[in-house]
Image (cartoon, rainbow, N blue to C red):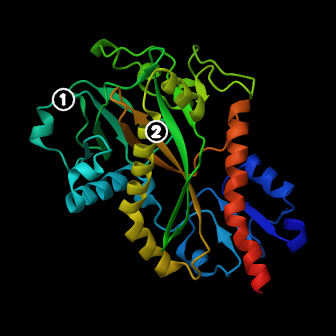
Amino acid sequence: VGELYNLAFKIVRTESRLVRGILSSHGFHEVHPNSNDFNLMWTGSHLKPYLLRSLLEFQKVNHFPRSYELTRKDRLYKNIQRMQQAHGFKNFQFVPQTFVLPAEYQNAFSKDKGPWIIKPVASSRGRGIYLVSSPSQIPLDESILVSRYISNPLLIDDFKFDVRLYVLVTSYDPLVIYLYEEGLARFATVKYNRATKNIKNQFMHLTNYSVNKKSSDYVSCDDPEVEDYGNKWSMSAMLRYLKQEGKDITLLMGQIEDLVVKAVLSAELQIAAACKMFVPHRSNCFELYGFDVLIDSNLKPWLLEVNLSPSLACDAPLDLKIKASLISDMFSLVGEFFIFIIVQM
């Protein structure tokens, strides 16, 4: 397709062998990061407003303006809190109780034992995250997020896990959301135990791959056909396991889809307004988000965070299998636009 229509891409402020490989295999040719002669820009960060305003109708970039309304932890929680107040708490009850410090320190919260999980407002890959058992251990002079720790996670073979979901938004006005059919279940490397004495053990409580790959207990799998071995499974393998255990996975996935749509809705107005202000053509932007979801022992999914530029690194064959299909499908959805524009012209 790329060769037929002479399509070009550039990669700016990021490195993605997967994106480069897939676009090249579809006949796209790569141009210098400073070139303006491109159809697709793949970048690791938001574009400045003047760059967005300069986009031509046939050009696309992989971020919307103000996506931080979803991907910054403090903004995400504020937006969801606003939706809870406007549309009823029970309809948006999929994030743990959260405070943004130091602004929201409350006496009621200071009397609640917890445990609490502390996160920097703008970090990723498990950096700077830790647990405390008492509010007295929480620093009050830092910009941090304090969330109630979900201490009853669903376990598989006694290990805690979370799920990385991939969500593609191709438009905020009208809102168009795609949830990719596959994802990754990421396991902690130490068996879960609620006892307070274990609260500092990151390998037990945190499921981030970036944290657990440093553990001597981390088990990787070198066979792309095996999806339920080691510390990283496919989401479908995890769902098959839960179904065999008698869990209602249809209900679970329905709740997960509901959570994804409502989270994006919470930031829709702000991002759509920014698009109207800075983006000259409705079809200039698209974005792939990484949603991290924890399932508790009652089979209720909780949204932990939404990631900007989710990792496309392929450290194991299973990563490559899932992420290559994901990126190919994403570019198929986004790429239909290129052909449409060329045919119109």
- Residue 85 is situated, as x and y percent measured from the top left of the image, at 20, 58
Residue 164 percent coordinates (x, y): 53, 39
Among the two numbered marks 1 and 2 on one chain, the one whose residue lies closer to the N terminus: 1
Q: Residue furthest right?
A: 3
Above or below 32: residue 182? above
Q: Which residue is mark 1?
A: 136
Q: Residues within 10 Å of mark 2 (few under 14, many from 20)?
A: few
Q: Residues within 10 Å of mark 1 (few under 14, many from 20)?
A: few
Coordinates of residue 217 in the picture (x, y in percent): 57, 14
For this view, does 251 lie left or right of residue 83? right
* Type of amino acid under label 2: Thr
- Residue shown at 49%/46% (left/top)? 291
Of tags 1 and 2, the one toward the viewer is 2
The residue shown at (25%, 27%) is 115
SS type, badge 2: helix
Rounded to the nearest whole Å, what is the CA distance between mark 1 and mark 2? Answer: 42 Å
Q: Secondary structure beneath disc 1? A: helix
**Res. 36 visible in picture:** no
* Residue 207 as seen in the image, left or right of residue 329: left
Q: Is residue 268 left or right of residue 77?
A: right
Whether residue 167 appears in this view of the structure is: yes
The quadrant of the rendering that contains the N terminus is bottom right
Q: Which residue is mark 2?
A: 250
Count of residue discs: 2
Vertical comparison of 251 with 12: above or below: above
Q: Which dot marks residue 204? A: none
